Amino acid sequence: MLLSFFLNVGHYSRWGLISTKGGTAVTTCFMLYLHAMSENKIVLTSADLAEFVARNQIAAKIVHLPVQTPTVAAAADALGVSPAQIIKSVLFLADGEPVLVVARGPNRIAWKRLADYLGVSRRRLKTADAAQVLAITGYPVGAVPPFGHRQRLRTVVETAVYDQAVVYGGGGEMNALMQLRTTELRRVVGGETAELAEPSSTP
């Protein structure tokens, strides 16, 4: 488990979350690992997600890929599907409370729209950092699924996600994605939806 966590060093660096200079990346990843392991917390994997899916009788499939898919484009290329079928799960903190936003991969989330929807000021809305994402969801940034987290999260789905019949989201690891129908996604996470995309980012 610890080894697989260190293998994500390059991913964190690509996302600009850590520096790779002077061994800082390894030190930071180790600190994130210790943070997740504190208070009996465990880093979750695709196996944990698959167990959650089976236990709750969710019609979804974990797809393991021979390559890592750190970006929407990489995921779409690896699967041979449209980027519009890739969804991302982004953890926000609204007045300190975690809110998961599930959005269509190519779209940029409009912070003002999200803040207005949640009823908080723009200044009180933040994205969770890598350590917070890991501690709250159990999964590393870039591999967060839309459900199956360490705790049940308030989840808001961008309306455009439901334009697709089948989507692929985080699968718990950098080389895994979860395939499911959007009708099943709605059933599992609930019906909370909102128009959250920046107008210029919507195809």
Image: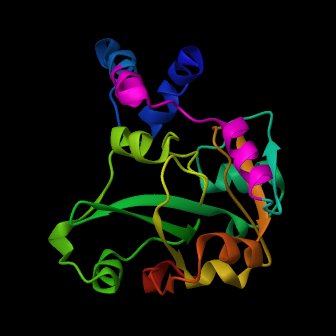
Q: Residue at x 32, y 74 (%)?
A: 111
* Foreground residue among 33 and 148: 148
Above or below: residue 71 compared with residue 125: above
Using the rendered view, name the quadrant where residue 68 is placed: top right
Q: What kind of secondary structure does the magenta stretch mostly adopt?
A: helix
User: Residue 53 colored magenta?
Assistant: yes
Quarter of the figure with the N terminus: top right
Magenta-span inclusion, residue 50: yes
Pick whichever, 98 or 101, lies toward us.
98
The residue drawn where x is 53% and y is 79% is: 158
Q: State the residue at coordinates (80%, 39%).
A: 65
Residue 20 makes an appearance in the image: no
Residue 114 screen position, x and y as percent: 35, 78
What stretch of residues is rendered in magenta? 31-56
Q: Is residue 182 left or right of residue 107?
A: right
Dividing the image into 4 quarters, which one contains the C terminus? bottom right
- In this view, 55 is above or below 194: above
63 left or right of 20? right
Q: Answer left or right for 1 relative to 10.
A: right
Is residue 10 shown above or below 155? above
Q: Position of residue 122 (x, y in %)?
A: 20, 75
Percent across and percent down for residue 155 are 49, 70
Which color scheme did the rendering employ for the protein? rainbow
Question: Is residue 74 rendered to the left or right of residue 10?
Answer: right
Relative depth, front residue between 31 and 73: 31
Residue 72 x, y percent position in the rendering: 62, 56
* The quarter of the displayed image where residue 82 is located: bottom right
